[in-house]
Image (spheres, grey):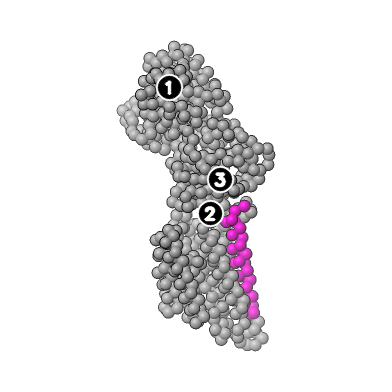
Amino acid sequence: MALAAAALLAGVALIRPLAGGPTDRARRVILAVAGAGALAAVIGAIGDLAVARYLLLVPLLALAAAAARFGPALLGVPAGGLLVGWLSWDTRRASTGTAVLLLAHVAVVAIWTGAALASATAEPSSRTAVVRRVGPVAVGAAVVAAGTGVLAAHNDNVTLHGITVTTFGTVVVLKAGLLLAAATLGLGARALLRARRAGHGGGGGGGRLPAGLELGVLSFALVVGAVLTSLPAPGPPPATGVPLARVLDLGEAITGLIVAPQRPGVNLVHLMTDRSTYVDVNGHRYQAQPLPGTQGLWAQIRLPAGRSLLTLHQGRQVAVQVVDTGAGAAQEVLSGPDGAECVAAALGALLGGSRGPLAPCPAQSLVLADAAALRAVVAYLGTRGVNQLTLIADASPRGVAAEREVRAAARTAGITVGEPAALAGQKPQAVLAVAGWQVSGTTLGRFSTAQAPTYGTYLAPWLLDSPLVAAAGGAPLAVLPFDPAGPPAQSYVSALRQIGPQQGASATGFYAYLAASGRALPPAPLVLYAAAGAFQILGASGHGSGETGVTWLGRGPLVAVSKPLPDPR
C-alpha cells in the first residue's frame, strides 16, 4: 500500500501543471491515499522492513498531497520527483544504465496514473479540456512504460524459464496484462469523448466510466508492481545440462552461487558465504553446511529431469534460480568426497569460457606438473635430513598415482614413508598431504599443536587453498609448478573474484580455467611456497609478499621460500 500510494501521489503531483487544480472528488482520493500510504509506511518501519526509508515516506507523501491539493502547480514537479526517487531507492546500487531505466519506468507509470485520475475525476463541463491536455501525455507515458518495462524485464532475466517457473515471472505477466488493459480503457475513453463531441458538440459526461475503470486497473497494476519489488528475480537463464555460476545480491551481501553438474540426480549447490542458508528445491528443503577442507557452504540436492526452481533463504533475504537439467538418467558423479573440488574445477572452466557439460573431475588423474612438484617436495625434504615422512593419501585415481610418485621419490632420497595411523601419538618429522580436499582437511585437523611436524606440513599443489591452509595450522608449504602472482594466475583470480569477492583461488580451478580458455599451463620453475592464514611472513629474500597472498588465498600471504627446485626425475 505504501508503494502504490507513493506512485499514485507522485503521478498526481507530476501531472498537476497540465491537469490543473484537483476537483473535490480528486481531493478526497488524494487525502485517502495519502493517509493509507502514511499508515502503511509507519507499519513498515515498525516491522523493520527499512526503518529510515519508510519513515521518510510519511513527510514525502504529505508534501506531494499538499502540492497536489493546495500548492502552486510547479511545486508538484519536485514533490513528485522526490517520490519517484523514493520508489527507486534500490537503484542506488545498480549501474547507471539500470538506474536510469528503472527511474524512467517508475516515473512514466506514475504520470500515466496521475493522468487517469485527472480524467476520471474531472467535472463534466471540463472533462474534454482536461483529456485534451493530459491525453497525449498519458499515451506517451504508456508507450514509454511498455518499452522500459520490456527492457527491465530483460534485465531481470524474465525469459520463458522465468515466466513459467517463478512467481516473479507470473507477476510480471499479470502486470503487463493490467497495463495493456489500462491502455485499452484509456484509449476507449478518449475515443468516446471525441465521438460525443463530434455528435453533440459538447464534453458532457462521456468517458467517465472508461476513465474510472482505467484508473482502477492502473491502481491494481501499481499494487502488483509493488508486490513485484518484494519478489526475487529469476536469475540468469540456465544452459541445459551445464554447470551454473552467478552472483547473488542478498540484502547488502554479495554471495556466489554454483550449481553442478545441473544434470538429473545428485547435484552440489555451493554458496560462497558463511551465513546460514537453506536451499528449497521444488518443496524439498536442504540446509547448506560447511565441508572439511572447503570454503563456504554446500548442499547436496536431488534434481529431477527438466526445469526446477532453487529458492535460497538467508535470514529474511530470498533469492531464486531456475535450473534446467535436461533429459537423461539420474547420475551421482558428485556424491563422493571429491565433489567439492570438482565443483571448483567446473567454476574455473566456466570462468574460462566453457559452455559444455561437467568435465572429468580432477581426482580422476594426476596432472604431470603436479607429479613433478611432489617429486621435488620429497627431494627437498631429503636435503633437509628428513628420514621419515607421514603421507596423507586416499583411494582416488589421483591419490593412488600421487602416492606412487611420492614413494618412488622417497626411496631415492632414503626416506621412509608411513601413514598417520602408524604414528601412535608420536610427533611426525614431516607430513605430506596428497589426498582430496575433504580427506586432507579432516586428517590435517587431527594433528594437535603438540604433534606439529618438526620439519613442517607440506601440501600437494591442488591443496593450496585457504581452508586447507587453516586446517594444516602454522605455515604449511607447497611446491607449485606455476607462478601464483603471474599474469595467467592473476587473470583467473580476477575472474574468480567477480563471482566470490572473498573466494580463495585453487590450482584445481586454475588448471580448468586455462584448459577452457585454450591455454596450456605456462612453464615455470618448481618453487616452494609458504602460506599463512592471517599474518605476514618473510620470504627467502627477507621481504614480505602480502600482496601475492591476498591475491591467491584471499587472506594471508603466500610467499616463495626457496630457489627453483630440480625435478629429481
Disc 3 and disc 2 in contact, CB within 8 angstroms: no
Residue 473 percent across, percent down from the top left: 39, 29
Boundaries of the magenta span: 165-193
**Which one is closest to the eye, mark 1 or mark 3?**
3
**Residue occupied by mark 3:** 285
Question: Where, by quadrant of the figure, is residue 445 drawn?
Answer: top left
Res. 232 mark = 2
Q: In this orientation, does residue 232 appear?
A: yes
| Residues at marks 1 and 3, CA–CA distance in whole angstroms | 40 Å
Of all residues, the one furthest to the left in this rendering is 542
Question: Which residue is drawn at the image coordinates 59% and 31% (left, top)?
Answer: 360
Question: Which residue is drawn at the image coordinates 50% and 76% (left, top)?
Answer: 29
Q: Is residue 174 magenta?
A: yes
Q: Main secondary structure of the magenta part?
A: helix
Question: Which residue is drawn at the image coordinates 61% and 35% (left, top)?
Answer: 332
Question: Where, by quadrant of the figure, is residue 185 drawn?
Answer: bottom right
**Residue type at mark 2?**
Pro
Q: Is residue 157 magenta?
A: no
Residue 139 percent across, percent down from the top left: 58, 71
Q: Secondary structure at mark 2?
A: loop
**Number of numbered discs on residues:** 3
